[in-house]
Amino acid sequence: MLISESSVFSPGEEGVYSNVAMRGRHADAYSMYKRGTRDYINAYDKEQVRSLNGVSKEIGNPSWKRSFLYILVASLASFLYGYHLGVINETLESISNDLHFNGNTMAEGLVVSICLGGGFLGSTFSGLIVDRVGFRRAFQLCALPMIIGSSMSATAKNLSGMLLGRLFVGTGMGLGPTLATLYVTEVSPAYVRGTYGSFTQIATSLGLMSSLLIGFPAKETEGWWRICFWVSAVPAALLALFMEFSPESPHWLFKEGRAADAEAAFEKLLGGPYVKGAMAELSKSERGGEAETVKLSELLFGHHRKVVFIGSTLFALQQLSGINSVFFFSSTVFKSAGVSSQSANISVGIANFLGSFAALLLMDKLGRKVLLIGSFSGMVVAMGLQAASASSLVSSSNEVYLSVGGMLLLNA
């Protein structure tokens, strides 16, 4: 029930949290932007906004098709995140044999976890990078360490080479999901924003399933694990290439004082008839943001602290449930329960995909709060089943079913 929770926060809430933090870190740059765009903002007085809103109602919603391809391109970052979460699952045994650290649990743990350390570094600086260079270049910077790291892992001759490659990949993993969530939020038409926000989670699920399926021959075919790492370089290269032809976020352009470029981006994303209305709404939101420039300290101790605390706590609970261990070690866990690794990994991938697809269908209908409550309620049931399977109240014949069922439910 956990991995799909990230889609519950997208797109609106995560965008708000991240944008507030970015403004706090760059108050001086934000002040410069305000001076550069004040004249443009003042051009849209209240009467013009009312008029433009009336026109917008008459012509209806913009076509979702115009931005659809760009959403798919951005979702490649989430696909790569899911792929690198699962690529080590089927291949770890073969990697440890070929690189001569088989049986060394510390080394195996490092191969798995060092990419998460790189992810911490990447996510820490993601806001700074986006503020400085924009989304398009940030996506390309995200793809670069994934290409380099995958190549280093695929050609590794020893444990050190593998660890260094995984560290590089991890930095890209830390950048990718944050960039994808914010970009999708800022380029999607409002009426499909929740649905498009779920695309990033579905892409993560597809990446996870792809890595598990591609890794099946690893135990029988010598050196196949190297192919698994080489494959991941392809979508990373496509991400870097296609981002060159994708529009920049109009919000970022407007914030930088490039109003004309923001209009061009809106025209590409929404269509000509909707540009003035979109710019009016953007100017209103930015004008409201001028009244409150938030510092990082205020996020922790000011009146934003409740929102930050709730959001951070939910993500912390997601990780503390141990969901990542399923992605990394499901083959080993299910094997000890007498279930074949291939059947187990197919089940894990399907469960994760179904949870993400349910979020896609229900996001705009039920809202994020309802999905969060339902998702965390499912977590409680799943972990209850796993706890029950380890108790003396359950017979040994039913123990496996409860444990496996709880793990799959948790993964959904």
Image: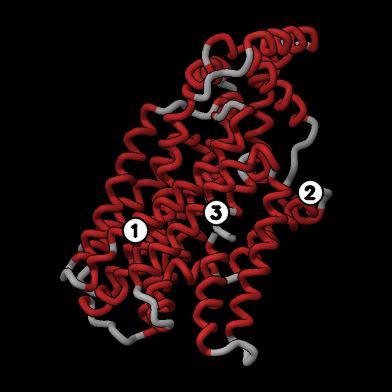
Q: Are marks 1 and 3 in contact (CB under 8 Å)?
A: no
Give residue 266's quadrant in the image: top right
Going by the image, does 148 lie left or right of 117? left
Going by the image, does 65 lie left or right of 346? right
Residue at mark 1: 211
Residue depicted at x 20% and y 65%: 224
Dot 2: what SS? loop
Going by the image, does 337 lie left or right of 183? left
- Amino acid type assigned to the residue bearing label 2 in the image: His
| Vertical position of residue 248 compared to residue 198: above or below | above
- Amino acid type assigned to the residue bearing label 3 in the image: Gly
For marks 3 and 2, give the CA distance.
Answer: 30 Å
- Amino acid type assigned to the residue bearing label 1 in the image: Ser
Q: Quadrant of the C terminus?
A: bottom right
Q: Do the residues labelled 1 and 2 touch (CB within 8 Å)?
A: no
Residue at mark 3: 355
Where residue 311 appears, x then y in whole percent? 70, 54
Give residue 151's quadrant in the image: bottom left
Q: Can residue 282 be seen in this view?
A: yes
For marks 1 and 2, give the CA distance.
Answer: 39 Å
Q: Are marks 3 and 2 in contact (CB under 8 Å)?
A: no
Dot 3: what SS? helix
Residue at mark 2: 304
First in residue order: circle 3 vs circle 2? 2
Q: How many other residues sit within 10 Å of disc 2, few (<14), some (14-19) or many (≥20)?
A: some
| Vertical position of residue 315 compared to residue 132: above or below | below
Residue depicted at x 57% and y 66%: 410
Front label number (1 vs 3): 3
Count the marks: 3
In the depicted view, which residue is nearer to us: 21 or 54?
54
